[in-house]
Amino acid sequence: MIKTLLKQTKGYRLPSVLCPLLIIVEVYMEVQIPFAMSAMVDNGIIGGAGIEYVLREGIKMVLMAFVSLLSGAGAARLAAKAGMGFGSNLRGTIFAKIQDFSFANIDRFSTPSLITRMTTDVNTIQMGYTMVIRMFVRSPIMLVMAFTRAYTINSRLAVVFACAAPLLLVLLGTMGSLALPRFKALMKKYDGLNASIQETLIGARVVKAFVRAKHEKEKFRISNDELRDASIYAEKLLILSNPFMQMTVYACIISILWFGSKLVIVGTMGVSELTAFITYVSQILMSLMMISMIFVMAVMSRASFTRVAEVIREEPDINDSMADPELAVENGDIDMENVSFKYKKTGKKNVIDNINIHIKSGETVGIIGGTGSAKTTLVQMIPRLYDVTEGVVKVGGRPVADYTLKNLRDAVAMVLQVNLLFSGTIEENLRWGNENATKEEIENACKVAQAHDFITAFPDGYQTNLGQGGVNLSGGQKQRLCIARALLKSPKVLILDDSTSAVDTATDAKIREGFKANHGDVTTLIVAQRISSIQHADKIIVLDDGKINAVGTHEELLGTNEIYTEVYKSQQEGSVE
């Protein structure tokens, strides 16, 4: 954990080191002032050294206070810079790690949990780091220096604190061990709250359409209440540390005043010495109070850092460390040999079971099957969004694991079921397919995808600004933009995962005609629910419960395969009606 933590200080190690050094200077000067004041009173006023001595010592005290002030201000600025930089590095590390995750890795954590870890947990760790390089240095040094000075003034009175220190350490250690699991549980409640908020905001239109706002408010209230209760449960234990610490310290102060006043009365201790001693007692008190705060933050930070470290240490299920960086996909041949897959290695049943397919480069292949037949999972193994559990998937005659993920995915364009667009203009979204595409290439891709006409109908055309997720477009418009974006990659393999479900049949037919005329050499896999989208394919694969039920052309399957014939008849009847 410490090793992982230290890596995030890169670029901010100098301020992280200078800050404690300035704090040492600040504390040293602060501790010297009471001692200098005691000497000035004893020698200059009571001892009769004269006004010159008093002025000289007074000027020294002012200079010490000024140096202490400057050092403290500099330390605060450096701590803020180091803390913010540390937090920025940590967020960057987590985000970069998540980009390497496979779908399985993301599923293991969940999206809301990853968001919580990058925001709430990182903020907690950042505050903890700032406190460590500042207060964690200041408090112990102040405690040691003040106690040393107090011991120098009167060793017998200083023993009172020496007796109290072990008691406080035992108290803090016990509370820390009990509080840690409570804070871990608290962070999980943050995950639950974020999940509730994310789900409601993403599905805002559905919530309004079904008048379920009241239900969502109640669901949020439950998550929010659970978070509040978990916070109270975690905090109330640590809150007890402050009263116990104050009670112990104030008991020490009362004892010191009691015994110190007696020493003054009998003449073994001067009034100025007792005054300085009480000042050091106050400094020790402040140090202990800060240690208590550090302790609370340390417990919270440890719980958060454990969660963040889990993400950083997570090994991606899919990597290309053994791949040939020079190997490129030559053509669109696809082979699946004895392929089986399950989401969890410990799972009992395969989602995909013993699939054997050979698709020639340039072929158009339709994939159809009932809901849950693993159509999407099957095609997602081609660009290695998931890795096979058994068997091998080949593209261009080579196993997909031989290619780097970049080279493989550059050659395979995929239009997912969820038509996701990003904030920005239409052109910026299209350039995800090819950032160097010319205006002519962009327009040609949009014409094939039947998107050019509706884009040019907007006042700003290709510069039309889209809201987050493309909220100002219809479902069919988003699908056509996603298809155009995929075509701009000039891929060897194009996967359309139910990507024309939101367009009418006439537009669907035009898109297919555009593919045939402009991208006939591209291997095209079309996952569809609608037979009209795939009936002209070179061959159609019928999936049933993760297994191949039949393979053939539309005419071959229509008379021989029960599943295909049943789907066709139901859709034809629906069309007639």
Image (cartoon, rainbow, N blue to C red):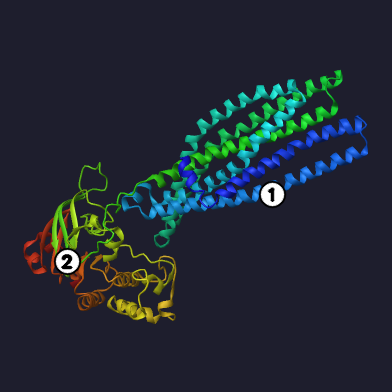
Q: Is residue 477 above or below residue 369?
A: below
Mark 2 and mark 1: span between their CA atoms? 69 Å
**Which residue matches tag 2?**
365
User: Pointer 1: residues within 10 angstroms few (<14), some, or many (20+)?
Assistant: some
**Which residue matches tag 1?**
73
- Viewed as shown, does residue 297 lie left or right of 549? right
Q: What element does badge 2 sit on?
A: strand
- Viewed as shown, does residue 186 lie left or right of 365? right
Q: Residue at x 59, y 27 (%)?
A: 169
- Foreground of the two, 461 or 12: 12
Residue lying at the far top of the rendered structure: 266
Q: Quadrant of the C terminus?
A: bottom left
User: Pointer 2: residues within 10 angstroms few (<14), some, or many (20+)?
Assistant: many
Amino acid residing under circle 1: Ala
- Foreground of the two, 498 or 208: 498
Q: Is residue 573 above or below residue 260?
A: below
Question: From this viewpoint, is residue 186 visible?
Answer: no
- Number of numbered labels in the structure image: 2
Q: Residue at x 77, y 26 (%)?
A: 153
Residues at badges 2 and 1 in contact (C-beta under 8 Å)?
Answer: no
Q: Residue at x 20, y 79 (%)?
A: 517
Residue 326 x, y percent position in the rendering: 27, 61
| 2 or 1: tag closer to the N-terminus | 1
